[in-house]
Image: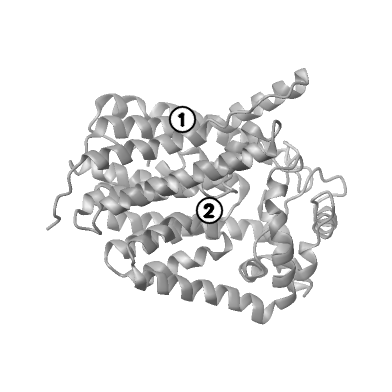
Amino acid sequence: MFCFPIQDRFVKAHALLPALVMLSLTGGYYLYTHINLTGLVTGSGSVLGGDFLAFYTGGAFLNQDILQEIYSINSGLLFPQQIDFQTSLISKDLDGYAPFLNPPFMAFIYSPFAKLPYVYGFIIWQVCNFLVLLITVNLLRQELVFLQRFPLYKLIGCCFLFYPTLGWFMHAQATPIILLIYVLSYKYLRHDHDFKAGFCLGLIAFKPQLAIALAIVLILKWRWQALLGGILSVSLCLASGFIFLPDAMIAYMEVSPQFLDLLRSSNYPTWGIHSFFGFSVLLLDDISTFASNLSTYIASGCTILLLCFLWHKSAWKKDLNRWDLAMAITFIWGVLLSPHLYYYDLMLLLLPAAIIINSIETGRTDSTTMLFWIAITWAVCFMSGFISIGQILMHDTYQIIAPTLQLSTPIIFLWGLSIFRYLIKKKEQITI
């Protein structure tokens, strides 16, 4: 979707080539490592299925009625029960593991896959997620006029020209499910079905930090039906956990405060986290943990204040184009508030990108600045993680303590800020 703009001839002529190069390099490497399998370990040393191993572990523990044991953590912030299970499943020489950190009620989703042999479960999981992506893009296509110019298969193809989408596929993550929830919430709000929108948003209870920004907007604009729907769906998720898995829910509540420490530990690939938290940890943690925490609070707080200011100045759907762009900013800045924002989670930016491009191509928004920031964001979402790894390797090689810059975080923020400034200057128009 980052390749759609057609008004600008330069973008039309040159945007596709680097995207195809990125797709070819990434896809080629993925195929090479998976052709050279040793058991369930790929040629790169990673596990076949990536993070699906964590989901499979959660489902397997539920199927064995021992889910509460999955959250047992030691002083080194490792989960010994999970490690034992995964090494016995994959290989005794397994280097690293995929921790299951979801709330217990999510294990109900993963349980059917864990009843199958690992490889079959992984394949079916990937197929299901691809179908979810197909449904999501089709829903968005029905909603945004500009996307209706393209057949569905081309839109799906464009999604895979965005590196985080490839990241979802390579890691076998659940990001398409979150994207579907985002799109449904946006679609229902756009059609004044507030209760349905809130109910859908509440289904992100397994990763609630991704709902913070939109929830704040709904409170600020007092969309009480949406709030009621959200409270209902969150309550249903929590109730399913406490009714059917009370011991596991208690164990999860006890261990979850340590998750932030896990994300900043040497056991975790913090270089891949693109949130305000990840940015601050990489930049300041080696100098001062207090400074990195303070940086996270300041960046998050200022972003929330800007978001509140924007929506305070914007009437609810008086000007639909302005509302769309304000929603795009909400989604862009909202993902940065989530502490665990791994690079595949940036796939969620497909939604605000589509909203913005629809606004450009329907002739209601100046394209120059918008296209520039979309192009820059596309590039840094591909390169930023590699740049961070390079800095870390250089620091290790020369044994120096120095800040590591996660380039994507400020760029994504500035992308939202560019639209924010446009809306603040622009007068509202009444949508007929």
Sequence order check, earlier mark of 1 and 2: 2
Farthest-out residue, top: 398
> What quarter of the picture does the N terminus occupy?
top left
- The location of residue 297, given as percent across then percent down, is 55, 45
Could you say which is closer to the camera, residue 79 or residue 128?
79
* Placement of the C terminus among the 4 image quadrants: bottom left
For the point 25% across and 34% down, which residue is it?
367
Task: Name the one closer to the observer, 338 or 1.
Answer: 338
Residue 57 position, x and y percent, is 73, 61
Q: Can you see residue 275?
A: no
Q: Is disc 1 surrounded by few (<14), some (14 to 19) or many (20+) residues within 10 Å?
A: some
Can residue 310 be seen at all in this image of the molecule? yes
The residue drawn where x is 38% and y is 40% is 416
At 56% across and 73% down in the image, what residue appears? 237
Residue beneath disc 2: 175
Amino acid type shown at disc 1: Ala
- 307 versus 205 height, above or below: above
Please tell me in which quadrant of the rendered image residue 399 appears: top right
Say few, some or many: other residues with alpha carbon within 10 Å of mark 2 (under 14 / 14 to 19 / 20 or more): many
Under mark 2, the amino acid is Thr
Taking 17 as reference, is 236 left or right? right
Task: Identify the residue under disc 1.
Answer: 379
Q: Where does residue 332 sit, x and y in percent of width and height?
A: 42, 45
The quadrant where residue 368 appears: top left
Tell which residue pokes out farthest to the bottom in this image: 243
